[in-house]
Image (cartoon, rainbow, N blue to C red):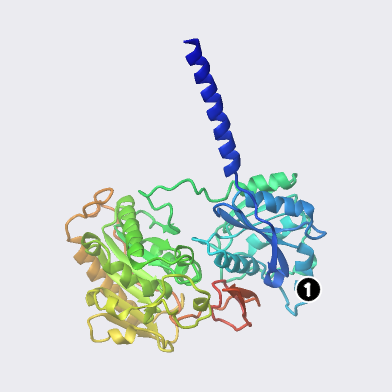
Amino acid sequence: MMLKKVIAQAAVACAGMMLAGAALAAQPTAAKPETVSGGRYGPVTVTKPSGPLRGFVVLFSRERGWGAADQQAADALAKAGAMTVGVDSERYAANLAAKQETCHHLDGDAEAVSHQLERLAQSARYYTPIVAGVGQGGAIAKQILSMAPENTIAGVVSVQPAAKLDARFKPCPPDPTIVRRAMPGFVETAAAGDTAKLVSLVTSHLHDTSSSDELDVSDLPLVELPAKGGSDRLAIVISGDGGWRDLDKTIAEALQRDGVSVVGIDSLRYFWSEKPPAQVSRDLARVMRTYMARWHANRVALVGYSFGADVMPFAYNRLPADLRDRVAVMSLLGFAPAADFQIRVTGWLGMPASDKAMKVAPEIAKVPPSLVQCFYGAEEQDTMCPALANTGADVIKTGATITSATTTSRSRRRFSARSASRWRRVERRRPLRGGRGACGSSDGRPAGRPFSRFPFRLRRGVLPRRRRSRIALIEAGKPVELPPRGGEIGIGTQHRA
């Protein structure tokens, strides 16, 4: 008996040593730092994790430039799973001072470098950048978040921020056309601390790669906009390739005000890696079932803008029959003849679809024409909408653009009438089966008004006037310089001429 006990104790001790050794062997490490071009940042120091990527951090140095303490923080963040871009704050300020600009949009530089380096790293998903720093670097990080539109910067970590931002940064005043209810990301500040404090605060916001629940939609980049007071109508909006911002966000908020609950799918993040049409449809089905049950909706509108419009027919045609029956209307805006299923730099530049793009004509032909609304502008050329005329689809031609302030009364009447009719027809159908709750009938919640307006521009590839900074992108190792041109989308960031 004593021998068995000794053997058991030895086995336990040995197993413990083996597990400890395995844990040490599996501990993430940081790859050797490398220096690459960072656009207006100048040369930046990139430190990558050797294991799974959990996030992307733009780390700004202290006042005197990139030093040993900054690299120590970058190494620690990389070991925690963050690709870390080290920016020499002094060099960045000098580069900006040399430019003939009245003010500088600092947030676009951080977002652009995240697009560039995550694409080169062939990341399976897109991580919105966290900006961080100590001292002057902390002040820069706070300034960036204060300027950033929603869904562009994940958050800020600022340790012992400098009391005053270096005057050479000359941040631009807030854009009066952007209304924000709060900061567009988390804010972590510490009045005292050092490298360890910064690393601790950043690490708490990195993605947890160990958690994956296939029964919910937490793995999808969704934006929830439930209607006030509830609604039995649900709109699922797939954004353009710039992500959930500007037009897509404005469309969704207008629908929400009209009493329609909205779930937005951020294309920039969802299609960062290639998704086959079948997977897109499966994920759309998950979103439909989840939110129809959660918000007690029984009628669904599928809305796609630009990139999102192009992929929508593929997703709809592969839905289960019971979910297709729940779709009241499919509205396509900026609908092109070919669909890409991965975000590409060429798309941001307004260039033609890639060689991998799939023709949409065979797919839209399978969609019942009575479901389809196709909006396009008079100046739009790369559009499928005219081809749908005389098919039974609702094809609406507007002026050059549709803005949030004005829409043609004809377009508004047609959209509202068609939507109301489709809502009523779907409402009479049998309850949906297979979801997480009864979704087939209204539970007394207010139905609200039918869709009445779409506040957005229609010209494909054109955004409202935002900021544009001269920044370089790299795809397949080739830099692309973007000259300032007012009003046109370039790389997925907002711009101002």
Q: Position of residue 227 (x, y in %)?
A: 38, 58
Specify whether residue 89 is in view.
Answer: yes
Quarter location, residue 362:
bottom left
Is 331 located above or below residue 15 in the figure?
below
Residue sitting nearer the eye, 379 or 66 = 66
Q: Position of residue 73 (x, y in %)?
A: 71, 51
User: Which residue does the image show at 37% across and 75% down from the upper left?
Assistant: 310
Can you identify the residue that label 1 sits on? 97
Residue sitting nearer the eye, 243 or 376 = 243
Q: Is residue 428 left or right of residue 80?
A: left
Disc 1 is placed on an element classified as helix
Q: Position of residue 124 (x, y in %)?
A: 49, 61
User: Which residue does the image show at 42% across and 87% down from the upper left?
Assistant: 380
Specify whether residue 158 is in view.
Answer: no
Q: Is residue 382 left or right of residue 58?
A: left
Q: Residue furthest right?
A: 64
Quarter location, residue 417:
bottom left
Quarter location, residue 363:
bottom left
Q: Which quadrant does the C terminus fall into? A: bottom right
The 10 Å Cα crowd at callout 1, few under 14, some 14 to 19, many 20 or more, is some
Amino acid type, mark 1: Ala
Q: How many marks?
A: 1
Is 444 located above or below residue 399 in the figure?
above
